[in-house]
Amino acid sequence: MAVNTAARLALTRRPRRLRRTEAIRSLVRETHLRPDCFIYPLFVCDGSSVRRDIRSMPGVQQLSVDEAVQEAVAARDDGVPGVLLFGLPPSKDATGTLAADPEAPVQSAVREMKRAAPDLVVITDVCLCEYTSHGHCGILDGEEIANDVTVAHLVQVALSHAVAGADFVAPSDMMDGRVAAIRQALDERGFERVGIVSYAAKYCSAFYGPFREAADSAPQFGDRRSHQMDPANVDEALREVETDLAEGADIVMVKPALTYLDVITKVKQRFQQPTAAYHVSGEYAMLKAAAANGWIDERRAMMETLTAIRRAGADIIITYYAREAARLLAAR
Ligand code: PBG
């Protein structure tokens, strides 16, 4: 059928004008991804020259301290300003003793990273689940996590990270009162410069599955519903964030990211504080799996995802894609 190119609509608005060329599109673009909003999570284990693949997270590895330092420096060279460290201790016990050990993988990695790259922002995850034999985030009383006893342990963990030289500690345990307790302990010990990134609105999510393989932290019985948030709630997320800010959090986090974009938006709008979102392991694994099957274009899906998180209101995005996305942005 012949197209009648002479046909004309009398339109006052033609939004397509602003989409005609890449130069015009970039002129009117509202959200910009930059490498300096990324934080790169790393899993640090014992030994040396270890790079152990994680089956469910292609491209992510468990790294010994020396390799983790190299990876952090490489990320910094890609333009990523900071890392978030998780530890795989050589052994576990009921109270997660090694979490506060000055010679454990995380504490060693912090010291080495600050030596190799003093300007790198080093953030440490503070939780007991990777360190307890039962995989729970705290000290058990029967089958329940005892809140205040756990907080006392978390304070010791956070202090050991601060002593090692961490810029921020990031409690991810979701115990009540931990931000205040950590803040007070840091200040008493002269670490008032060490900040707190609180996992403020951390939901009880299916999307942490691959992480639990990576960090060997799956609970041996039960689940995390007694402390992580119900995915159905958003008012509660605002109360959590308000509480953590009042207790001294410098940066608040929403986690996961994609299924909680509305929460990110509300947190940013309500409190206007530095807000981070964690693009978690399952969200990463889904993209990797679909891409491996040839079902989606991974680079486009990655950028669209990270842009969405930023558009929702996140200032900081914690993502396993940090290096890849930073390199892609630099190549543009
Ligand atoms: C707890 C912690 C978890 C994640 C970050 N910190 C797992 C959990 O709560 O079970 C998940 C991160 C991810 O899935 O990428 N230490």
Image (cartoon, rainbow, N blue to C red):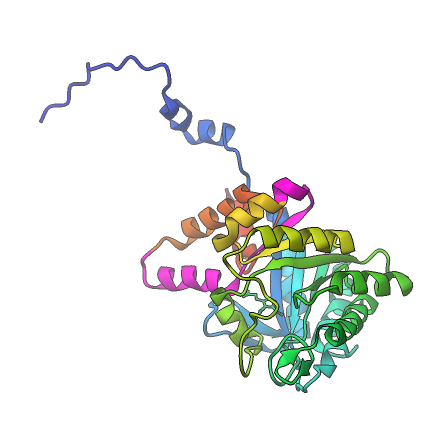
Quadrant of the image where one finds ligand 1: bottom right
Rendering coords of residue 44 (x, y %):
64, 73
Rendering coords of residue 98 (x, y %):
73, 81
The boundaries of the magenta stretch are: 268-295
Q: As drawn, which residue projects farthest toward the left?
A: 1
In the displayed structure, would residue 325 be above or below residue 105? above
Give the residue displayed 90% in from the left and 63% down from the top.
Answer: 188
Rendering coords of residue 288 (x, y %):
42, 62
Give the residue displayed 41% in from the left and 49% down from the top.
Answer: 300
In the shown orientation, is residue 115 left or right of residue 19? right
Give the residue displayed 48% in from the left and 68% down from the top.
Answer: 57
Is there any visible trace of residue 165 in the rendered image? no
The quadrant the N terminus occupies is top left
Q: Is residue 17 highlighted in magenta?
A: no
In the shown orientation, is residue 58 left or right of residue 237? left
Which sits in the foreground, 306 or 117? 306
Instruction: State the image quarter where residue 287 is shown.
Output: bottom left
Is there any visible trace of residue 146 in the rendered image? yes
Which sits in the foreground, 258 or 2? 258
